[in-house]
Image: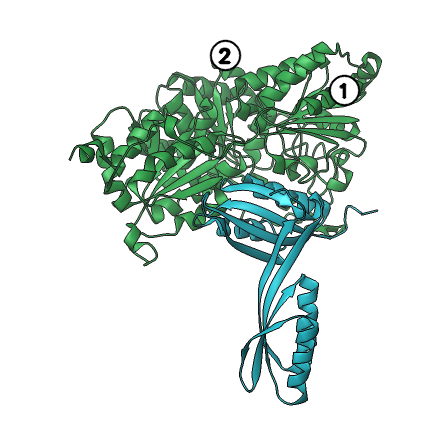
């Protein structure tokens, strides 16, 4: 049984008008009301209707998450808010570019692990690799953790993109 | 060439759009970038412009105008400081859900971001203190933006909307679009879900210790909503309490009214909330001044919440049943369902409930020890009420003790006659708000009940009143202190009156004279009636300086962080509260 005070993580998909300042409104809402943002991804997804999709991973009690959704719905240029975590099964993916600089056995080991994670090498020098790894947040986390002792120097992550399973649109 | 003729300048488009939106009055202050708009205003006579003395006052005046008429208030200011001066007013309007459209000038688009003269990022600054805001980038977008701004301001939960207009958009040429051509995706839910309404009615009919808890949302919904609410309450025979913002939504003289609730609400209202088995919240938001300590708020009550704003539901208090929509529609449907199902209140239980409530009423919690030597502030308000009620006056207030005494002792029978800063608690609200009310109702009696400290925050507007011949009456309860601050210092901070006493005040009678208004003063209880009568008889702005008891505290009071059943009824009760005490991880304020 979930307790009212339990902190839950939710992935929320938001369809917004692709106009200046929308992202600032969303971020301002979160900072102004003290909500968490664990990950936020935004890009235009519908050029005909001029819509962008924002995927937010946030956490809070049931009451707080409910508030977040309702506060988002209140913003004028926001057309749709869906809680992928509660609305049914969904899939989510994140992409990370991971730079590892090392030599000798460490360099070879990093390649082996990349292979296991099905990460691609997208840049290589004699001293470094840039790996591209795609997967659920946990997988990306695990990959980065494994690279730490192998010469990890830099990470760039996209944040989570998520979509509901099945045939229906948002 | 023909097409060029069909086009208008941005300033012309703006004024045409305002007229098409039914605007009659603009509160504003000119400046550099908005001069082309003022030039257009000069050439026409359909829009009346009220020249204020400070832009904050323009917004409060528009609030007073909006709240006393149910229409959208309109403000026009210049860029930079003109626009930043509106922030307090906009925030006030957002907190109290007042529909406004505020037009701010902006530097030309090519200079935006260059730290130009009188430039401020107003869209950025006002984002958290408006319902929505716009930066218009070309004249062709202007008319559509204005129409949508009015739609957004008044639809759903009302609120302030800012339109930022760069100078090149004001002077450039574009095409006008009538309101009928406006397309918007902003369509808040207005009708309530019928199944949810039926369930609410069932819960209401089944209750044994019910109470209606009504807020400013009912007033915002309109006079019809207030009438429907009154009808429903009378059909059930249940007690009805009002929030500070909801005063007037239900007639104060009705025996079913138990008065205001909350921090300075009545004993019977707060204890009825505490003892209730069902709370029917119509258009209120379980604000912290209402609930007291959340953990002990209405422990045995099921809660129904009717609100147009879904984000108000389950924000502070988890409710058992919610109906989202405009309360006018929902109340109408509830009455229909109540009649169709032939609901009857639980007669025996209700009789017992009223007996308990009448016992609480018997405590006469608003009682105070009157004096024949010194003017008690409560006495001054009571006399003001008795001597002006035949004129059905509009009352505005500033913020503090006088505001609470006004809420307790002035009785409101109708909505839209009570304008006060509830959510933000803005000292300096009352005088400009009264100005806006008087503009909307030129022949009505409009009184700003003020404190001597609050009034000095926007006292410059006396000049506006005189210029525009607005006979607002300013009724100052002058106790030489920031009274509410002093009260908290006495009760919570060991009587250390840090900076709550103003050593020096202006002579308000001479000040009135200096502005060209009339100044009156009462220093003894016997003089109160005379100055009030004289105040009413003067057809000019008046300042009445009523010298009241400086040590009087406002009771009853729920001390910060306490629960409804822990009210302090008067000074004879020993009050001990630690400042900033911590309970369950929450600092009490």
Q: How many marks?
A: 2
Labels 2 & 1 near each other (Cβ < 8 A): no
Give the structural element (helix, strand or loop) at label 1: helix
2 vs 1, front mark: 1
**Residue in the foreground of this view, choosing between A4 and B493:** A4
Label 2 vs label 1: CA separation?
A: 41 Å
Q: Is residue B527 above or below residue B174?
A: above
**SS at mark 2?**
helix
Locate residue A62, reporting x and y percent: 72, 46
- Compared to residue A141, the image places residue B315 above or below, namely above
Q: Which residue is mark 1?
A: B202
Residue B346, x across and y down, in percent: 81, 14
**Shade of chain A as shown in the rendered figure:** cyan
Q: Residue B459 vs residue B301: left or right?
A: left
Please say whether residue B462 is visible from this viewpoint.
Answer: yes
Q: Position of residue B219 (x, y in %)?
A: 55, 24
């Amino acid at each position: 049984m979930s307790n009212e005070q339990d902190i839950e993580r939710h992935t929320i998909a938001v369809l917004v008008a692709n106009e200046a300042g929308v992202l600032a409104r969303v971020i301002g809402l979160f900072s102004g009301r003290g909500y968490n943002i664990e990950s936020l991804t935004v890009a235009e997804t519908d050029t005909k209707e001029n819509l962008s999709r924002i995927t937010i991973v946030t956490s809070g009690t049931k009451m707080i998450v409910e508030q977040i959704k309702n506060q988002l719905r209140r913003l004028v240029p926001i057309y749709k808010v869906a809680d992928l975590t509660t609305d049914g099964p969904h899939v989510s993916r994140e992409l990370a570019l991971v730079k590892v600089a090392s030599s000798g056995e460490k360099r070879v080991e990093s390649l082996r692990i990349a292979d296991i994670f099905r990460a691609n090498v997208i840049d290589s020098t004699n001293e470094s690799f840039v790996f591209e790894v795609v997967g659920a947040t946990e997988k990306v986390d695990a990959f980065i953790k494994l690279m730490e002792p192998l010469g990890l120097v830099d990470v760039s992550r996209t944040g989570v993109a998520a979509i509901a399973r099945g045939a229906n649109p948002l | 060439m023909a097409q060029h003729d069909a086009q208008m300048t941005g300033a012309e488009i703006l004024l045409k759009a305002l007229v098409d939106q039914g605007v009659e009055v603009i509160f504003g202050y000119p400046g550099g970038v908005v001069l082309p708009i003022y030039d257009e205003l000069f050439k026409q006579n359909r829009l009346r412009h009220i020249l204020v003395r400070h832009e904050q006052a323009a917004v409060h005046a528009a609030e007073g105008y909006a709240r006393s008429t149910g229409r959208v208030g309109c403000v026009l200011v210049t860029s930079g400081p003109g626009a930043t001066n509106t922030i307090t007013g906009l925030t006030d309007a957002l907190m109290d859900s007042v529909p406004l459209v505020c037009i701010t000038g902006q530097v030309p688009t090519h200079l935006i971001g260059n730290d130009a003269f009188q430039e401020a990022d107003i869209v950025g600054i006002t984002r958290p203190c408006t319902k929505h805001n716009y930066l218009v980038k070309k004249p062709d977008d202007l008319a559509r933006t204005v129409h949508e701004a009015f739609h957004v301001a008044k639809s759903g939960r009302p609120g302030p909307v800012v339109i930022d207009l760069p100078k090149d958009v004001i002077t450039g040429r574009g095409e006008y679009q009538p309101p009928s051509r406006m397309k918007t995706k902003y369509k808040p839910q207005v009708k309530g879900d019928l199944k949810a309404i039926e369930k609410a009615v069932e819960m209401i009919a089944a209750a044994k210790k019910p109470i209606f808890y009504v807020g400013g949302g009912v007033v915002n919904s309109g006079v019809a909503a207030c009438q429907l609410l009154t009808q429903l309450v009378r059909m059930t025979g249940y007690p009805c309490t009002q929030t500070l913002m909801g005063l007037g939504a239900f007639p104060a003289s009705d025996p079913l009214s138990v008065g205001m609730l909350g921090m300075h609400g009545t004993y019977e209202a707060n204890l009825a909330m505490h003892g209730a088995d069902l709370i029917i919240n119509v258009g209120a938001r379980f604000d912290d001044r209402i609930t007291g300590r959340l953990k002990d708020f209405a422990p045995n009550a099921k809660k129904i919440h009717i609100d147009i704003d879904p984000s108000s539901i389950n924000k502070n208090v988890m409710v058992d049943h919610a109906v989202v929509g405009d309360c006018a529609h929902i109340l109408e449907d509830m009455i229909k369902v109540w009649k169709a199902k032939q609901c009857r209140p639980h007669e025996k239980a209700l009789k017992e409930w009223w007996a308990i409530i009448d016992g609480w009423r018997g405590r006469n919690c608003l009682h105070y020890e009157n004096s024949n030597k010194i003017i008690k502030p409560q006495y001054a308000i009571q006399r003001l009420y008795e001597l002006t009620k035949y004129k059905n006056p509009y009352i505005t207030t500033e913020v503090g003790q006088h505001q609470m005494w006004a809420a307790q002792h002035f009785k409101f029978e109708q909505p839209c006659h009570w304008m006060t800063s509830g959510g933000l608690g803005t000292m300096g609200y009352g005088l400009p708000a009264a100005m806006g009310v008087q503009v909307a109702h030129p022949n009505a009696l409009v009184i700003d009940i003020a404190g001597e400290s609050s009034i000095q925050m926007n006292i410059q507007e006396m000049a506006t009143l005189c210029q525009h011949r607005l006979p607002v009456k300013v009724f100052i309860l002058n106790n030489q202190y920031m009274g509410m601050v002093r009260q908290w210092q006495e009760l919570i901070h060991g009587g250390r009156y840090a900076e709550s006493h103003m050593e020096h005040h202006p002579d308000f009678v001479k000040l009135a004279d200096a502005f060209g208004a009339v100044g009156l003063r009462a220093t003894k209880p016997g003089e109160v009636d005379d100055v009030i009568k004289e105040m009413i008889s003067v057809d000019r702005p008046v300042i009445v300086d009523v010298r009241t008891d400086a040590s009087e505290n406002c009771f009853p009071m729920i001390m910060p962080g306490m629960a409804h059943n822990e009210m302090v009824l008067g000074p004879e009760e020993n009050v001990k509260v630690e400042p900033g005490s911590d309970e369950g991880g929450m600092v009490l304020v």
